[in-house]
Amino acid sequence: MEAKINNKGLSRKVSLPIYFILWLIIAIIGFAEGGIAGFAIGLASGVICSILTITGLIPFVGIFVYMFGAGWFNVLLTSSGIEAPIALSLSFWGFFVFALVGYVITSIIAGLLILKGLLG
C-alpha cells in the first residue's frame, strides 16, 4: 500500500510492525482458547513479552533477564485461572527469538570491545 505525500510524487510504503502482527496472532489464539478472558490474557502476555525483549540488549546476561521476567509474568497469568497455554507459550517463545538476536549481537560487540581494550 502506498500513500502519496505532496504533489512531488514522494511516496511511502505503509506496513504493520511484526510485533503488532504477533500480538494479533497471540490474542486470537487466546480468544480461541479462553474466550474474551483468553483474548485479554494473550494480549497482555504478548505486550509484556515484547516490552521485555529490550532486556536482550544487555550484554552477557540479557537473555537470562528476559527468561526470568517473561517466565515469571507468564506464571502469574497462568495462576489467574484462565486457560490459554498455547497463547502464553507462543508469546514467550515468539518474542524470545527477538531477545536472542539482540543478545547475540550486543554480546559479540561487547566481547570485541573488551578484547580490543585488553589487547591494546
Image (spheres, helix red, strand yellow):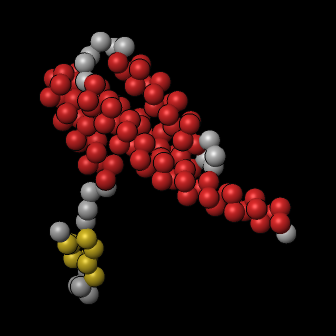
> Going by the image, does 3 lie left or right of 88?
left
- Residue 113 makes an appearance in the image: yes
Q: Position of residue 93 (x, y in %)?
A: 37, 39
Q: Nearer the viewer, residue 16 or 96?
A: 96
Q: Is residue 91 left or right of residue 70?
A: left
4 over 25 or under it: above or below:
below
- Position of the C terminus, as image quadrant, is bottom right
| Residue 80 in picture, x, y percent from top left | 34, 14
> Residue at position x 37%, y 13% from top?
79
Q: Residue at x 32, y 29 (%)?
A: 88
Q: Can residue 46 be seen at all in this image of the molecule?
A: no
User: In the rendered view, would you say 91 is above or below 33?
Assistant: below
Left or right of residue 12, residue 106 in this image: right
- For the point 33% across and 49% down, the residue is 19
Q: Quadrant of the N terminus?
A: bottom left
Residue positioned 69% across, 57% down in the render = 111
Residue nearest the observer in this picture, 12 or 82: 82
Above/below status of 72 relative to 115: above
Query: Which x, y percent locates residue 15?
Result: 26, 62
Quadrant of res 73:
top left
Which residue is situated farthest in the bottom direction here? 8
| Numbered label tally | 0
Quadrant in the rendering for residue 95: top left
Whole-percent x, y for residue 60 in the image:
64, 46
* Front residue of this view, candidates 13 and 74: 74
